[in-house]
Amino acid sequence: MSHPVAVFVSGTGRHLENFASLAQAGELDVDVRLCVSNKEGVLALERAARFGIDSLVLDPGRDLGDEAFSREAFAACTARGVELVLLAGFLRKLVIPQVWEGKVLNIHPSLLPAFGGKGYWGDRVHQAVLDRGCWFSGCTVHVVDNVYDNGPILLQQVVPVEPGDDVHRLAERVFEAEAQAFPEAVRLHLEGRAR
Ligand code: GRF
């Protein structure tokens, strides 16, 4: 039986689409049951609808504290029988309930612990990599704990920074690596082969 998963998003939802397509093609043994967004009107919600995935927009006005937000988000997952939560471009602090520890994965567009933590998201990450003159960047899939970008690392993929790169070109190259790394990390995790 496919593993029921939820994907949490705040933006374009490219990984949501990737997971849903891989599941549809029988290349990844997941059933994307729920998309949780903390933003209204984002492209990710359209992608979810296109795949017939249930979505929930939670607290777009930021009225809830982080704990109350997290309780509601994970309660929605529990109600749908979700066993693994995938953060894919999700830009809100979560407080992981104890029963969910080890069951929430995130992808970050750098080689953690470099260029991670509060404030490092989206193009800011790639700009910082370029400003520092790094020769390599990449992506990291890790287990989420209660500190930003801090939990155990499941998988990393390295990409070169090419001379003349700008943020856009580097971001594109890193995303290509992400599109391989995230499903592979999910596979390893579900099969109990993660190191
Ligand atoms: C990816 O770069 C991922 O590393 C980061 O968010 C991006 C995906 O979100 N966490 P989106 O498809 O751009 O909304």
Image (spheres, rainbow, N blue to C red):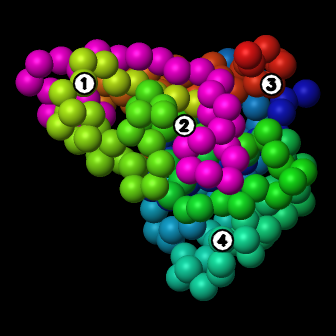
Observer-nearest of 12 and 62: 62
Q: Are marks 4 and 2 in contact (CB under 8 Å)?
A: no
Q: Earlier in the sequence, mark 1 or mark 4?
A: 4
Q: Residue at x 91, y 27 (%)?
A: 1
Image: 136 above or below 78: above
Q: Earlier in the sequence, mark 4 or mark 2?
A: 4
Asked if residue 130 can be seen in this view, the reply is yes
Separation of marks 2 and 3 at Cα, in angstroms:
16 Å
Kindly state the secondary structure of the residue where label 4 is placed.
Answer: helix
Please tell me the numbered disc located at residue 66.
4
Instruction: Give the mark toward the camera: 1 or 4.
Output: 1
**Label 2, ligand 1: CB separation under 8 Å:** yes
Residue extending farthest to the bottom is: 63
Residue 142's x, y, as percent? 62, 33
Instruction: Give amino acid for label 1.
Output: Cys
Whether residue 46 appears in magenta in the rendering, the answer is: no
Q: Are marks 2 and 3 in contact (CB under 8 Å)?
A: no
User: Depth check: 113 or 193 in front?
Assistant: 113
> Callout 4: 10 Å neighbours few (<14), some, many (20+)?
some
Magenta stretch, residue numbers: 142-171
Q: Secondary structure at mark 3?
A: helix
Q: Earlier in the sequence, mark 2 or mark 1?
A: 2
CB atoms of marks 4 and 3 within 8 Å: no
Q: Which residue is mark 1?
A: 134
Residue drawn at x 66%, y 60% as measured from the top left: 94
How far apart marks 4 and 2 lie (CA) works out to 20 Å
| Residue located beneath label 3 in the image | 190
CA gap, disc 1 and disc 4: 34 Å
Of labels 4 and 3, earlier in sequence is 4
Task: Give, as a three-letter code, the residue at label 2.
Answer: Ile
Is residue 16 or residue 119 the one in the foreground? 119
